[in-house]
Image (cartoon, rainbow, N blue to C red):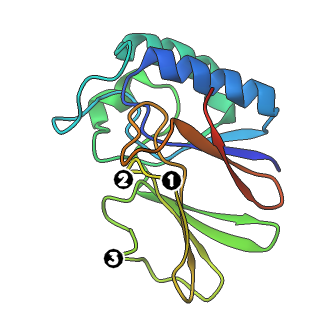
Amino acid sequence: MKLMIASDIHGSSYYCRKMIGAFQKENADRLLLLGDILYHGPRNDLPKDYDPKEVIAMLNPMKQKLLCVRGNCDTEVDQMVLEFPILADYCLLELDGQTIFASHGHHHNPQCPPPLKSGDILLNGHTHIPANKDMGTYTYMNPGSVSIPKDGSAHGYMIYDKGFFWKELV
């Protein structure tokens, strides 16, 4: 299975459109969203073309291809307008014998990891900073942010296709 992984759209119709274009270009089977889909949050500036209603209109038709976990800015109100589940705190994926614990990162992260076994991957968004770090017993990965990258990083996403690859959203 080819999986595209993205996080932190924060209601930007501009970057959501770019993300969907990348998803189509990558010809991925599924898109895993690591939270913070519609709302920009009180700590972030408004992203380019902030339009949560347009993001809803773009994502709902893709509902059968989406897997999502809840970000710290995602609420029950968001779930009322989105036609796919977004309120799971985490998900476990088994890809090619590799166990992946995917969450937004505001609860489970390298400072407060979930129970992981040797060789597992902890996959987070939240920080808006791409990462691929060996943590000793597990690997920490982060695709960065689709719409509000931080720490000088680019707008980006990850692809899983028998291995992880970070890509810049262009």
Mark whose residue sits in front, 1 or 3: 1
**Residue 156: quarter of image:** top right
Q: Could you say which is closer to the camera, residue 138 or residue 154?
A: 154
**Mark 1 residue element:** loop
**Residue under the image location 28 percent in, 40 percent down:** 73
Res. 30 in view = yes
Identified by mark 1, the residue type is: Pro
Identified by mark 3, the residue type is: Cys
| In-image side of 113 versus 40 (left or right) | right
Disc 1 and disc 3: Cα gap in Å?
A: 18 Å
**Mark 3 residue element:** loop
Up the image or down, 41 lies above or below 55; here it is below
Q: Could you say which is closer to the camera, residue 79 or residue 24?
A: 24
Seen as rendered, the residue at the extreme front is 152
Which residue is identified by label 1? 130
Q: Position of residue 50 (x, y in %)?
A: 34, 16
Disc 3 and disc 2: Cα gap in Å?
A: 14 Å
Identified by mark 2, the residue type is: Thr
Up the image or down, 25 lies above or below 134; here it is above
**Residue under the image location 51 percent in, 82 percent down:** 135
Which residue is identified by label 3? 112
Up the image or down, 69 lies above or below 133; here it is above
How packed mark 1 is, by other alpha carbons closer than 10 Å (few <14, some 14-19, many 20 or more), is many
Which residue is identified by label 2? 127
| Mark 3 or mark 2, earlier in chain | 3
